[in-house]
Amino acid sequence: MNLPQNKTLLRWILIVTAFLVVTLILWNTNIFFQKFKQEERSKMEVLATALENMNKADLDVEINLELKIIASNQNIPIIVTDQTGKITKWANLDFDRGSQNFDDLSTKDRIYLTKQLDVMKGENKPLFITRESEKGSTTDAVYYRDSDLLNRLQYYPLALVLILLLFGTVIYLVFKSNKVAEQNKLWAGMAKETAHQIGTPLSSLLGWVEILRMENADENTVIEIEKDVERLNTIADRFSKIGSIPKLTRHDVVLETQKAYDYYASRSSKLVDFSLNIKNKEKIYALINTQLFSWVIENLIKNAIDAMQGKGSIHIQIASKDDKYIVIDVTDSGKGIPKNLFKKIFDPGYTTKKRGWGLGLSLTKRIVEDYHDGKVYVKKSEIGKGTTFTAMFNELV
């Protein structure tokens, strides 16, 4: 059995074990709860018997035991009613007025006792005691409510389940973060290896360019080949920086944007109309990594071209906002993006194209926000009319 299968089996063993533990704890808690409730019932039966003995006792009979039994009840609220249902006695409630007559209480207190009686009727069956009076024997009902300890105990399983769910969520997030970290490490390793593999043929291509120049090949052709070789070298440099913290230096964002703009404008279809507008300042500086910054601009332009299916207009605007932020807007006349997908399109792997990895915008977001402490988002979009992406960087004054 290989390592991934072992990890999966171990994970299922942990899940099943946790489920069995939770089930066992809940089962034992339920047994303890029912036993505790029955003990309170037995205690109330003893108390009811003590009350009945007191009612029946002659003046010369000792009732110290009965008094001790009644006084020992300090935590179970009780209400006694006569055979007509009228409240005659109460104890262990929120106010100590057990010696008063029910009719002498305020309206607020009578309402409170009546509500408490309704609660007791819903929780437990009453106990009946016989009381002797001048008019003969009458039957009183003793109602009682579960103690505060028992009430808190019934929420214990819920609290336990919530704690276990929280613990399970933490474990899941740890497993997930570890998996994401492993995937990121794999992608970074593949990217660095790709950059390393590209390096060898790049060196050869540079040599062939020099040979073509020595053999008096057409200079324009040689220059264009040099540009493409330099482009490949830039791509290799970008891939080599994935997974490591890039070095940021002071550069003119307008100039670096212009370079990326010129490259795509000269090599894209003539059916795409490009335009660039610079507002406020001719030069705007920021701490950037030029290779990664150009990758951001190129990704946004390429995404715009794909959205227009190779035909339409792309407008780029660069502006300084309050001498604090550099705002770069890339607007296309493409098919637009539904509002509910404004954030989802930046998720790794999300793509609407039949052929594509869905990494362009996610890499753009990572470069801007993680490496440059900036922000990238969909500024606005309208179905059938186009979309505007905004990338913001911190300006150096």
Image (cartoon, rainbow, N blue to C red):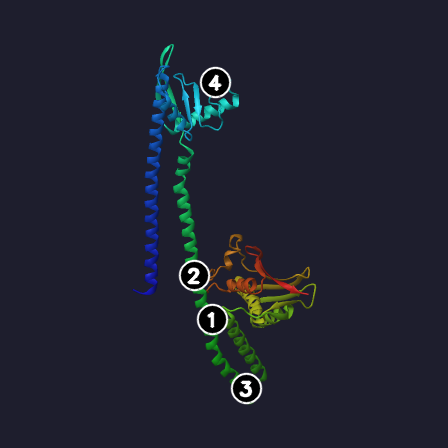
Q: Which comes sooner in the sequence, label 3 or label 2? A: 2
The kind of secondary structure element at disc 3 is helix
Q: Position of residue 158 (x, y in %)?
A: 40, 42
**Residue for point 36% across, 27% down:** 44
What residue would you read off at disc 1? 191
Is residue 65 something one can see in this rendering? yes
Q: From the image, state whether disc 4 or disc 3 is nearer to you.
A: 4
Question: On screen, 112 above or below 6?
Answer: above
Callout 2 amino acid: Asn
Number of marks drawn: 4
What residue would you read off at disc 4? 101
**Is there CB contact under 8 Å for labels 3 and 2?**
no
Q: Which comes sooner in the sequence, label 3 or label 1? A: 1
Callout 4 amino acid: Asn
- Relative to 91, is 316 on the left or the right? right
The kind of secondary structure element at disc 2 is helix
**Residue for point 32% across, 48% down:** 20
Q: Where is residue 114 in the image (x, y as percent from the top left)?
A: 46, 23
- Near mark 3 (Cα within 10 A), the count class, few <14, some 14-19 or many ≥20, is some
Callout 3 amino acid: Glu
Q: Which comes sooner in the sequence, label 4 or label 3? A: 4
Alpha carbon separation for disc pair 3 and 2: 48 Å
Alpha carbon separation for disc pair 4 and 3: 113 Å
The kind of secondary structure element at disc 4 is loop
The kind of secondary structure element at disc 1 is helix
Alpha carbon separation for disc pair 4 and 1: 87 Å
Q: Which of the numbered marks, if any, corresponds to residue 210?
A: 3
Alpha carbon separation for disc pair 3 and 1: 29 Å
What residue would you read off at disc 2? 178
Q: Which comes sooner in the sequence, label 2 or label 4? A: 4
Nearer the observer, 202 or 160:
160
